[in-house]
Image: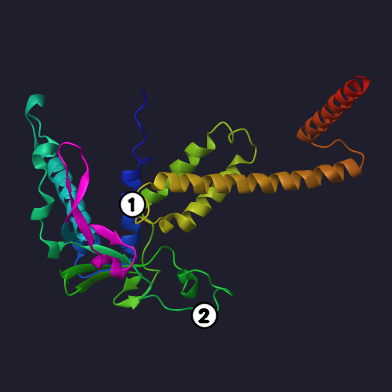
Amino acid sequence: MAARNPYLNNKDLLKEIHNSKTSYSEFDKPEYHRFDAIAETYDDLFLQAEDVDVDKDTGEEIPNGIMYYPIVREAQKSKAARIAAETYAESLAAYDGPVSGKPRLIDHKIDPTTLDEKELIYRVTTYEHIPLEPGRKKNPRKEAEYYVKLNFIPFKHYHITDIEKKKTVEIGRSHSENGEFCQTHGAMTDALARMFMLLVERYSQRANWRGYTYVDEMKGQSLLQLSSMGLQFNEARSANPFAYFTQALAHSFTRVLNIEKKNQNIRDEILVSQGLSPSFSKQIEHENKVRQMREEAKAAAENGNE
């Protein structure tokens, strides 16, 4: 069985999407580009929930009256998993002994609660630092339509210094260079561009597309679409960019197909009006219509005789 192409998995796609967005962003320290949790609004950082105990016999969750911050717990788990994966990969790369003694991931896991809460990094979706552009949309319906058009959803990175008093420190922001708004200094990574090319090529080989003579035009349109909206993927709502991009490819291929069909119908009508034979597909379509009409007429006649 052939190995799965490494460019076509969600982990690598997410990594390159993140690296591409980072190139358009500015951080107080280079390592601050890595976030541990995402909040869709600033206020979400301070939302609380009631903790629960799990009954050992029934598995039922019972509220225990203890309040906690879900975003902090999520960030701790995420960072602990990342640290474990990194240290495991380093140990595995450095190991040169028998197979039976290879390092195990379970030996590198750490307790999330031991991580310093003040060192966690939170990404918050916000348009605070984006310039307004009145008139960009005649009747704006979304928040984004009031601001300058962007290549991806803007954000800021924060440390929470005192969650009880809702105190935070901004440590980075997107679309920024030298403290000023900018979205021309970054670029999509070469690796992500190659992934898009592979996605398009794989998708074009599907049985329902590869037979069309204008499949190259479909591929070109799809690459243009992915390059323009590829970074719009929202990590806060999904961890499956592969499905997101596949859906975009389906729309792009179908759009070209509909345009070509429309143009072909116009050409066929001109040919018929000039007394010439239309395309083969039009002839087949006509024959099928005639056959269907005959069958319907025959069925109606038989029903009438009864």
Tell me the kind of residue under disc 1: Glu
In the rendered structure, find residue 158 and report the number of the disc placed on it. none
302 part of magenta stretch: no
Q: Nearer the viewer, mark 2 or mark 1?
A: 2
SS for dot 1: helix
Residue under the image location 21 percent in, 46 percent down: 61
Task: Please report the bounds of the magenta region as a residue range.
Answer: 35-64
The x and y percentages for residue 229 are 47, 57
Q: Classify mark 2: residues with Cα within 10 Å, few (<14), some (14-19) or many (20+).
A: few
Residue under the image location 31 percent in, 73 percent down: 177
Q: Name the residue under label 1.
A: 16
Q: Is residue 98 visible?
A: no
Tell me the kind of residue under disc 2: Pro
Residue 202 placement, left or right of 101: right
The correct choice, above or below, for 292 with respect to 186 in the image is: above
Residue under the image location 55 percent in, 78 percent down: 135
The x and y percentages for residue 194 are 41, 46
Q: Is residue 80 visible?
A: yes
Residue under the image location 32 percent in, 56 percent down: 18
Q: Which of 106 and 202 is in front in this view?
A: 106
Q: Mark 2 points at which residue?
A: 134
Total number of numbered discs in the rendering:
2
Q: Classify mark 1: residues with Cα within 10 Å, few (<14), some (14-19) or many (20+).
A: many
42 part of magenta stretch: yes
Q: Which of 263 and 37 is in front in this view?
A: 37
The x and y percentages for residue 206 are 53, 33
Residue 194 placement, left or right of 205: left
